[in-house]
Amino acid sequence: MNQKENNAESSVDQSSLHSGERYWGKVEVIEEGDTYRISRVEIKPKYSIKPQIHYHRSEHWVVVSGTAKVFCGDEEKLLNRNESTYVPPATLHRVENPGFIPLIVLEIQNGEYLGEDDTERPYDLNLVKPVAE
């Protein structure tokens, strides 16, 4: 196998790690390079992704359909179709779908390292404590 075939194969393997069903919806990697990844993210109505931080990449989110409630650092905002936001590296962030139709977002990740081990969640960082039952 030549280098080009090997790179294409590893790229497909990486994409399959990031694509798939989640409890909150699904992710499909559209395109991926060494320093970027473009994904289609679909979030079910009344669901959200867990709060998270990435230290080696930023993210741009463009709303394609639905309404997004975005939490980025200390800021909270609503985004409608054709609106976008930027998530800088090392910033606690999450997005939720407050609406009644699926939220579809194009997510562009950009950075020198895109590995999933660069994702930390507040429970891991002791920033958010679970509510006692």
Image: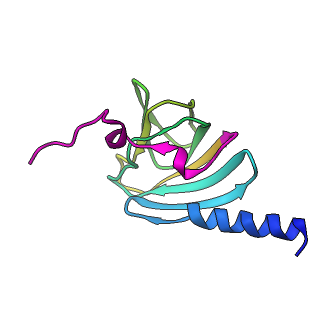
Residue closer to the observer: 3 or 68: 3
In reply to whether residue 130 is colored magenta, the answer given is yes
In the current view of this chain or complex, which residue is farthest to the right? 2
Q: Is 103 on the left or on the right of 38, as rendered?
A: left
- In the depicted structure, whether residue 91 falls above or below residue 99: above
Residue at 34% in and 53% down: 47
In the current view of this chain or complex, which residue is farthest to the left? 133
Residue 48 appears at what percent x and percent y? 37, 49
In the current view of this chain or complex, which residue is farthest to the bottom? 1
Residue at 70% in and 46% down: 36
Residue closer to the observer: 50 or 55: 55
- In the depicted structure, whether residue 115 falls above or below residue 94: below
Residue at 61% in and 54% down: 39
Residue at 34% in and 46% down: 98
- In the depicted structure, whether residue 56 falls above or below residue 8: above
The magenta stretch is 110-133
Residue 116 appears at what percent x and percent y? 54, 51
Q: Does residue 69 appear in this view?
A: no
